[in-house]
Image (tube, rainbow, N blue to C red):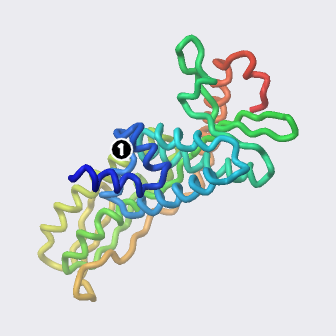
Amino acid sequence: MNSNIYASMLSDLPEIVNFAYQNNPENFYNVTEIFDEQESNLSKFLQILAIAEKLRHDQNFKNNTGIQEKFSEATNWYKFLSLESELYFANELKNLNFDVSFISDSSLEWQENNQTLPSPDLCAEKDNIKFLIEVAKIKDDDTTDNIANLIIPIIRKTKFRVNIQYCQDFSYPVTSYEERENREKLIHDFVAKFKQVITEVDTLPHDIDILGCKVEFTQSLLNHGYYACCSTEVLTNPADLIKPRIQFELERKANKRMKWKEEKKKYHI
């Protein structure tokens, strides 16, 4: 690509995106590569960017550069989604007349003897009282939407009407990063098998089991295939899983305080 054209493209980017790309291009790639698979993630990215830009240009916001650094430090898509929660709480605190600033992982204020200490996410100050804030995101579940985004382009090229009844493995909400990773693998395996199966359907109606899910193929009522609907097993709110997860997150965040400098421990958290 012509270097002048490339430079022009970068100059047209929002400053916060340009900063993230220039400072950590590998991180920025890891965050955005998922757009190739799921268009809904592009919409989410733009929503988060809009909130960040709004805060960054707010004259009452205390530390604008901290937002840029946060974007730059997001190592993958799921870390980037955690940033959304921090932006949301920062905006809510600002609306309550707190002076709010972001604390990046590389903040010199949180380094000692050339080592980076575990820093909080935000600092909020009001009436001369300073609060150091940790934000934890307990993920909700969007498994069926993720699968739909991946298989709809495939189905549209066929003559099939497709309905899926998801089993419990796909229906149960995930509440931790590790569970999310396992769910992502399950989604990947399901889609890979679906791609294979859809090329083998020769008679209709046709039902098949894919990883415990019932997938039904019938004749499309349109001139192209379409994803008709899906259903999941009925599950009650898994409080027995969510409550321990909330407790775990509270303890994990509070334990970071034990490694702070003594002068930082006096602040509220």
Q: Can I make out residue 241 in this image?
A: no
Quarter of the image containing the C terminus? top right
Residue at x 29%, y 74% (from the top left corner): 162
**Crowd class of label 1 (few under 14; some 14 to 19; many from 20; radius 10 Å):** some
Instruction: Indicate the position of residue 250 as horizontal and vertical percent values.
Output: 66, 34
Looking at the picture, does residue 205 appear above or below residue 54?
Answer: below
Q: Please state if 91 lies on the left or on the right of 209 as rendered.
A: right
Residue at x 33%, y 49% (from the top left corner): 186
Q: Name the residue under label 1.
A: 30
In terms of image quadrants, where is residue 147?
bottom left
Q: What residue type is labelled 1?
A: Asn
Looking at the picture, does residue 212 appear above or below residue 258?
Answer: below
Looking at the picture, does residue 220 appear above or below residue 181?
Answer: below
Q: Please state if 105 lies on the left or on the right of 169 as rendered.
A: right
Out of 24 and 88, give the one closest to the viewer. Answer: 24
Residue at x 53%, y 40% (from the top left corner): 70
